[in-house]
Structure formats: structure tokens, C-alpha cells
Amino acid sequence: MATALPWLTAVPGQDELPLGSALALATLSVGLYLKAFTVQAYILSFVAVLFACVKLRKETVQAAKLAAREEVVSAMAAAKFDVKEARVAAREEVEAALAVMKHDVKAARVAASEEIAAAMAAIKRDAKAAMVAATNDVEEAKIAAKLDVEEAKAAAREEIAATRAANKLDVKAAMVVAKNDVDEAMLAATKDVEEAKVAAREEVETVMAATKREITKARVAAIVAAKMDGEEAKIAAKKEVEEAKVAARDEVEAAMAATKLDVKAAMVAAKMDVEEAKDAAKIDVEEAKVAARDEVEAAMAATKLDVKAAMVAAKMDVEEAKDAAKIDVEEAKVAASEEIAAAMAAIKRDAKAAEEAKDAAKME
């Protein structure tokens, strides 16, 4: 005991001042060892014993010191025992808290992994749905483009058929008009020829009638002259008759030649009119064919342009659908990565909190 507390040993032959300082140091050391545990009663009793020891005589100081030492030793033992129990209890509480925190961290990690798995599954489902929707949009766009192209082709075919039918009708009408013109020209030519023949016949008949009248007159004059002059009158009458016959023949031949010339001229004019009508009809038919070809080519070019425009629009719709699908997938990936990063940050924060709690428990 004396070796444990050398500052409590008594020195014979000295007054009460060293004893008081020793007692004060003892109280300070006991207060430092006991801290805030349940040793306040021991301290009070020790102080009371010390104050009682001061008043005692020197003969009883030694016995008081021994009693105080024993009480201090027992108090220190009790304090050490309480400190050990407190440390054990603190360690158990810290271990329990750490176990609870580990369990919470594990549960948080499991929940975070489940949430991440659920988020990834949802993202995959959304991505698959987006891809399916995109493929559906692309297929619908392709089908719509095909339908538009087919409709454009059908419309173009109908327009081409309509233009061809119209052109055929125009050609047929032109041919009918040309035939009508040719028929009218032929009729006009035949009418002109018949009129020329009739006029020629009338002229010949009039000439023959006039010749017959002159012949009869010459015969009458010849008969009269014959009666009057005899043979001379007969000869003169014969000459006049012959001359009248020759003149009549010349006039008839001239009338017939003129009639033939008129008929030939009428036939040539009719043929020329017929040829001109045929040429005009051919020109009209060629012009109608050229116009029909131009219209068909224009319709085909417009149809090709419409088909190209429809194909370009369909391709643009398909590209836009693909771009929208890619954007949706990228946004889903970004959202998934952000959710994963947020979950990992929450797990790291929980782990940091657990580490800080461990450090705090160790410090305590």
C-alpha cells in the first residue's frame, strides 16, 4: 500500500501542513480516477475522514492514514471495476450498433441492388418497347410509303390510260374528220365533174341544135336557090352544107375538148383537194400523236417525280423514326445511369456514415 501511494506516507517530526497537502493531492487523484462514476459517496466519506484526521492527535494520525488508505484502495478497486464494466458495456453497445449498422448497410445494398435491377429491367423494357415502337413506326412508314407509291403508280396509270384514250379518241376524231373531208372533197369533185359533164352535154346539144338549124336553113336556102339557079344553087348549097357541117364538127370537137379539159381540170383539182385533205389529215394525226406522246411523257415524268417524292418522304419518315428511337434509347440509358449513380452515391453515403459511426465508437 505504501509503495502504491508514496505521497500518503507520514513523515515523523513535521507539523500538519504536509499532511494537508498530501490529503489535497489524494483527493485530486481520486477525483481524476473516479471521474463521473458512482464514487461520490466514497469521496465524501474520505473527505470527512481526512477532516477528522486533521483534528486528531499525532498518535491517531497514523491509524487514520491506514484506514484512509484502505478505503481509497477499495474505492479505487470499485472504480476500476465500474470502469471495466462500463468499457465492456460500451464495447457491447458499439458492437451491437456496428452489427445493426452492418445489417442496415447490407439491407441498403440489397435494396439498392434490387432497385438498380428493377430500374435496369424497367429500362430494358422501355428500351425494348421503344425499339418495338420504332420498328412498328418504321414498318408503318414503309407500308405507308409503299401504299403511297402504289397509289401514285395507279393514279399515273389511270392518267396515262385516260390520256391514251383521249389521244386515241382525238386521233379517231381526226381520222373521221379527215375521212369526212376526203369524202366531201370526193363528193364535191364528183359533183363538179357531173356538172361539167352536164354543162358540156348542154353546150354540145345547143351547138348541135344550132348546127341542125343552120343545116336546115342552108338546105332550105339551097332548095330555094336550086329552084332559082339550078345547078349553081345546088353546088353552093352543098358547099354551104359542107362548110356548116365542118364548122359544126369543129365547134363540137372544140366543145368536147373544152369539156374534157374542164373534166380533167376538175378531176385534177379534186385529186389535189383529196391529196391535200389526206395530207392535212395525216398532219393532224401526226400532230395528235405527238401531242399524245408529249402528254404521256409529261404524265410519266410527273408520276416519276411523285413516286420519287413519296419515296424520299418515306425514307425521311423512316430516318426520323429511327432517330427518335435512338434518342429514346439514349435518354433511357442516361436516366438509368443517373439512377444507378444516385443509388451508388446513396450506398457510399451510408457506408461513410457507418465508418464514421465506427470511428466514433472507437473514440468513445
Image: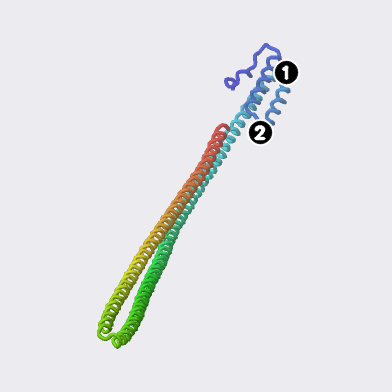
User: Which residue type carries mark 1?
Assistant: Arg
Depth check, front residue: 305 or 319? 305
So how many labels did they put on this image? 2
Question: Where 181 falls versus 33 (above or below)?
Answer: below
Quadrant of the drawing holding the C terminus: top right
Percent across and percent down for residue 22 are: 66, 18
The residue pinned by badge 2 equals 38
37 left or right of 260? right
Element marked by disc 2: loop
Q: CA distance from mark 1 to mark 2?
A: 32 Å
Percent across and percent down for residue 209 are: 34, 83
Residue drawn at the location 66% of the way across and 13% of the way down:
12
The residue pinned by badge 1 equals 57
Residues at discs 1 and 2 in contact (Cβ within 8 Å): no
Element marked by disc 1: loop
Question: Where 121 falls versus 89 (above or below)?
Answer: below
Residue drawn at the location 58% of the way across and 22% of the way down:
4
Quadrant of the drawing holding the N terminus: top right
User: Which residue type carries mark 2?
Assistant: Thr
Depth check, front residue: 339 or 352? 339
Q: Which of disc 2 and disc 1 is earlier in sequence? A: 2
Depth check, front residue: 45 or 358? 358
Percent across and percent down for residue 234 are: 26, 84
Quadrant location of residue 82?
A: top right
